[in-house]
Image (tube, rainbow, N blue to C red):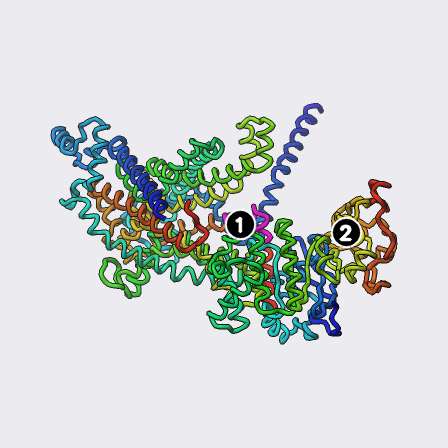
């Protein structure tokens, strides 16, 4: 177990290093921070001062190591827009995003798994067709549009919940639902096909031949096996929501989390803040990945150290 | 050996099973009849696709849509299992009074459940044992099928067992509720030869000690002789010949049975050379009107365009052939193309 | 005489050739007709491609033409609508229908380019990794693993923000963050194919690797890559729409469905149509692709087809019994 986690941690380090290189190339080689961050009217002298302040006038290799050194000491620079260290801004917004992801994934799993499983009992039956249709629709609706539609219907039209903002459960429900829908659709589809597949496995036939009632075969045998790939998907959904898909939802609902802040940072040309968000998210992905791997080893006895 | 009780515990009457596939209606079983008396052992022999396994599945109620039993009957101690009340009774029988061992022990166990979990599940379900008692009984069962360190093994998963060991576990599961009939569907096909013999010995021992009836399904005539009193030979969804193992082996009536015996290597007979039955069994999508073996039969004639009736043989068995007991296969040394001669 | 006979000859053979080449199309359509949902999806996609190609000919208005007089007019079937504006107008008085037709161009241009770009690079990398094996394989797959774990959308946002948003930028950036899946799939198939007897035999006999790849490996890649490419297509359409909605994708004066939803957002309290129609266009397009891909996946796999038939029959038998 120890070496297993160590190996995953090493892989995670590579990911963070990869992100560093891409961000460095993007911000220093492709883009010009001075051009992005200073107003168009800036004079050459202002420009030179800016470059000197952030070491942008030094050779690229020196810049790169300075860049990595700063990251190692958790120094992401100062947010120009918020006038405080970028990392503080990011950590301040983090709980809101975690709240949204938690609520959204909870909805996706709690609704998606049972519906998918029930659909699988009678493949191609009426309920199954309904579920497949709903999943396909959920997969096809753009999230930002779904969010706007929900606002239009439930907040503007019916007035049941506020249109945007945060604080109460009523504020949370629409953003969480919007974030959940595509994940829910994918989970439903996978649970369905996975349960159908498991119900056709030999061990299910032998369980039936042992005279076990259908519901016991379904829950104790088929579902348990079907959930292994579903958990992989659920983990992937959490990661991909965390890796940026909250940006859209947070923007639509003005939800003050990391994604909303990232968009604000772009609007304010605050590159340092944007960098800090990207890094914190990258580290988060690595941690969630390690956590999921450990979880899987506990669930499935067949997984050996790989 | 053969029990004196006149009533069979299992009787299959003119059973037909159809499968609705994209290509059309496949007639998996085309009128299968046989019966098993208490303590009797019977072999269902035939090549793959002949309907042996479908028969077993029909008895166990495992024919799922879009397959269905289209006609015929299955009776347990004289009571039909296919009527509405019968189906309810059948649900309680399966796993308890009738149990089954499957061909592939590698995939027959739930990979996420311990071996003990499997055993405890059946014992609690059918015997109503408490958890502790079920565990203790599970250990006994593993011990009975020759698994060492049964207590430790109870907590392990299927992937920690070898193929032969898994099949022993499957047998332990099958006999857990002291069934009266055990159906073994190719129980040794997936195993190494040395392990095959061990598993067959185990089945023979259990049969004697528990007074089990066994239906052994196999394509391998070699393993029939040691275990079974009766043999039924299946071809293209029906039984073409049945009788005691001795009569079927020594006086095979049907050309297919003769061919099957002659194509099985025997240690005790070095003179006769092996033959092969040319061609392939007919498609069950559009089975022939007459004798299904006609196209491969070396002694077929015009008569065979009509379906031969089942008739009794002098030795007390039965056969479905217009010209039974004719020696159908010539020595390969006389003619290499013996199988194709008409 | 001679002239007519020579000229009529190639004509008939041309006709025959045309008929011959149309035969598979007919088979394809009749096969597709059996799955009504798949057929509807395919029909919508064909319509969409035609609309995108001939947008300037069909569109009733210039998509960029503003009209202060005709701001936020509702669709034609509602009260207060303005004649000539079938689906109404947006906040600048531009015709929504015309913008939808032109928006199809952006969506298709971006998604086709990204799938082609990411697909060809990803497939190449996968072929090399799977075929060369060893260190090359290890390096390529490590890069893939690392990049898959990147914070995809956020990094995309960062890149777009730094480079400056434009149609070209999002094509390049989306291709950069979406090539890995092709590499994984292709390498997986190549690895398993290399262990099959027919490839091993070809290697033993001494076939050139290029010949093995072209003759033996590529044909086996077509079906899975087709399905993958089509599904990726939906992802890219949604990604383009989302980026344009956030203001980091297609830039005005060009049109895009995502851009139009963003434009109508501030007026949704008083007018539902400026955001509803472009959003519906995105949803219908993606749904159509999904339905078609679903049919394609089942049809290219005989085992799947058989299973689908069995399920359908079982459902029918159950219904007639009940």
Asked if residue A234 lies left or right of residue C15, the reply is: left
Quadrant of residue C254 in the image? Answer: top left
Spot occupied by residue B264 in the image (x, y as percentages of width and height): 75, 49
Q: Height in image: C315 above or below B330?
A: below
Q: Residue at x 25, y 49 (%)?
A: A258
What secondary structure prevails in the magenta region?
Answer: helix
Q: Horizontal and vertical percent for residue C101?
A: 40, 45
Image mark 2: chain: B
Residue A85, relative to residue A58: is it above or below?
A: below
**Left or right: A199 with respect to B235?**
left
Q: Is residue C294 magenta?
A: yes
Q: Residues within 10 Å of mark 1 (few under 14, many from 20)?
A: many
Q: Residue at x 14, y 45 (%)?
A: A84
Determine the secondary structure under disc 2.
helix
Residues rendered magenta in the picture: C293-308
Q: Which residue is mark 2?
A: B260
Which one is in front in this view, the residue at disc 1 or the one at disc 2?
2
Front-most of B246 and A97?
Answer: B246
Residue C295 - label = 1
């Amino acid at each position: 177990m120890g070496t297993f986690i160590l190996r995953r941690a090493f892989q995670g380090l590579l990911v963070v290093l990869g992100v560093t290189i891409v961000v460095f190339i993007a911000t220093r080689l492709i883009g010009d921070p001075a051009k992005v961050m200073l107003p168009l009217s800036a004079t050459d002298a202002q420009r030179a001062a800016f470059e000197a302040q952030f070491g942008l006038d030094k050779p690229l290799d020196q810049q790169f190591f300075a860049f990595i050194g700063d990251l190692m000491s958790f120094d992401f620079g100062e947010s120009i827009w918020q006038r405080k260290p970028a990392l503080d801004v990011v950590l301040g917004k983090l709980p809101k995003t975690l709240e949204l992801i938690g609520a959204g994934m909870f909805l996706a799993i709690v609704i998606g798994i049972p519906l998918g499983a029930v659909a699988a009992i009678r493949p191609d039956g009426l309920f199954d067709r309904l579920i497949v249709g709903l999943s396909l629709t959920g997969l096809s609706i753009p999230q930002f549009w779904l969010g706007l539609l929900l606002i239009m219907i439930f907040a503007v039209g019916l007035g049941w919940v506020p249109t945007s903002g945060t604080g109460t459960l009523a504020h949370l429900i629409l953003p969480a639902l919007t974030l959940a829908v595509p994940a829910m659709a994918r989970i439903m589809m996978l649970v369905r096909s996975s349960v159908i597949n498991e119900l056709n496995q030999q061990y299910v036939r032998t369980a039936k031949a042992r005279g076990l009632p259908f519901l016991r075969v379904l829950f104790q045998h088929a579902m348990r096996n079907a959930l292994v790939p579903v958990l992989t998907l659920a983990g992937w959904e959490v990661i991909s929501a965390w890796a940026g898909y909250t940006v859209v939802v947070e923007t639509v609902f003005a939800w003050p989390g990391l994604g909303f802040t990232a968009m604000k940072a772009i609007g304010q040309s605050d590159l340092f803040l944007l960098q800090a968000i990207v890094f914190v998210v990258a580290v988060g992905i690595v941690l969630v990945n390690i956590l999921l791997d450990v979880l899987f080893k506990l669930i499935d006895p067949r997984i050996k150290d790989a | 050996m053969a029990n004196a009780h006149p009533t069979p515990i299992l009787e299959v009457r003119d059973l037909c099973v159809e499968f609705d596939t994209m290509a059309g209606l496949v007639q998996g079983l085309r009128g299968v009849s046989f019966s098993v008396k208490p303590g009797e052992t019977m072999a269902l022999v035939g090549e793959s696709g002949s309907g042996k396994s479908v028969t077993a599945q029909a008895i166990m109620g495992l024919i799922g849509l879009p397959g269905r039993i289209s006609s015929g009957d299955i009776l347990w101690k004289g009571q039909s299992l296919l009527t509405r009340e019968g189906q309810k009774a059948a649900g309680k029988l399966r796993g308890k009074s009738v149990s089954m061992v499957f061909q592939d022990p590698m995939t027959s166990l739930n990979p996420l459940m311990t071996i003990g979990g499997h055993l405890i599940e059946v014992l609690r379900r059918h015997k109503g044992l408490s958890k502790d008692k079920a565990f203790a009984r599970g250990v006994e069962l593993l011990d009975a099928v020759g698994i060492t360190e049964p207590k430790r093994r109870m907590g392990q998963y299927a992937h920690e067992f070898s193929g032969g060991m898994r099949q022993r576990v499957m047998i332990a599961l099958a006999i857990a509720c002291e069934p009266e009939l055990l159906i073994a569907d190719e129980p040794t096909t997936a195993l190494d030869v040395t392990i095959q013999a061990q598993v067959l010995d185990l089945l023979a021992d259990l049969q004697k000690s528990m007074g089990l009836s066994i239906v052994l399904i196999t394509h391998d005539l070699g393993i029939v002789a040691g275990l079974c009193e009766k043999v039924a030979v299946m071809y293209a969804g029906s039984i073409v010949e049945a009788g005691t193992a001795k009569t079927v082996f020594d006086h095979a009536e049907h050309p297919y049975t003769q061919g099957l015996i002659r194509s099985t290597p025997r240690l005790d007979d070095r003179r006769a050379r092996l033959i092969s039955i040319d061609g392939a069994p007919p498609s069950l999508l559009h089975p022939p009107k007459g004798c299904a073996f006609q196209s491969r039969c070396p002694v077929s004639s015009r008569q065979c365009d009509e379906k031969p009736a089942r008739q009794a043989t002098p030795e007390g068995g039965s056969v479905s052939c217009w010209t039974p007991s004719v020696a159908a296969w010539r020595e390969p040394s006389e003619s290499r193309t013996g199988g194709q001669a008409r | 005489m001679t002239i007519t006979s020579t000229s009529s000859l190639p004509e008939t053979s041309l006709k025959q050739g045309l008929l011959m080449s149309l035969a598979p199309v007919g088979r394809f359509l009749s096969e597709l007709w059996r799955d009504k949902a798949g057929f509807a999806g395919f029909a919508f996609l064909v319509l969409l491609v035609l609309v995108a190609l001939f947008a300037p000919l069909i569109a009733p208005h210039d998509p960029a033409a503003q009209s202060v007089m005709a701001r936020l007019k509702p669709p034609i079937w509602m009260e207060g609508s303005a004649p000539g504006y079938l689906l109404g107008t947006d906040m600048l008085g531009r015709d929504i229908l015309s913008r939808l037709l032109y928006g199809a161009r952006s969506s298709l241009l971006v998604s086709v380019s990204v799938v082609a770009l990411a697909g060809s690079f990803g497939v190449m990398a996968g072929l090399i990794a799977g075929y060369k094996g060893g260190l090359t394989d290890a390096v390529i797959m490590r890069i893939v693993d690392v990049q898959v774990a990147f914070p995809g959308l956020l990094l995309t946002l960062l890149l777009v923000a730094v480079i400056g948003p434009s149609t070209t930028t999002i094509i390049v950036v989306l291709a950069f963050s979406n090539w890995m899946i092709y590499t994984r799939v292709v390498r997986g198939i190549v690895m398993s194919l290399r262990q099959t007897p027919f490839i091993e035999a070809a290697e033993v006999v001494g076939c050139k690797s290029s010949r093995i790849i072209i003759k033996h490996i590529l044909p086996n890649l077509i079906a899975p890559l087709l399905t993958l490419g089509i599904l990726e297509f939906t992802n890219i359409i949604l990604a383009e729409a989302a980026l344009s909605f956030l203001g980091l994708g297609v830039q005005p004066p060009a049109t895009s469905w995502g851009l139009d939803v963003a434009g109508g957002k501030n007026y949704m309290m008083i007018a539902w149509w400026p955001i509803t129609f472009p959003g519906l266009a995105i949803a219908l397009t993606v749904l159509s692709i999904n339905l078609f891909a679903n049919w394609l996946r089942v049809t290219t796999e005989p085992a799947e087809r058989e299973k689908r038939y069995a399920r359908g029959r079982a459902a029918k038998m159950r219904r007639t019994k009940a």
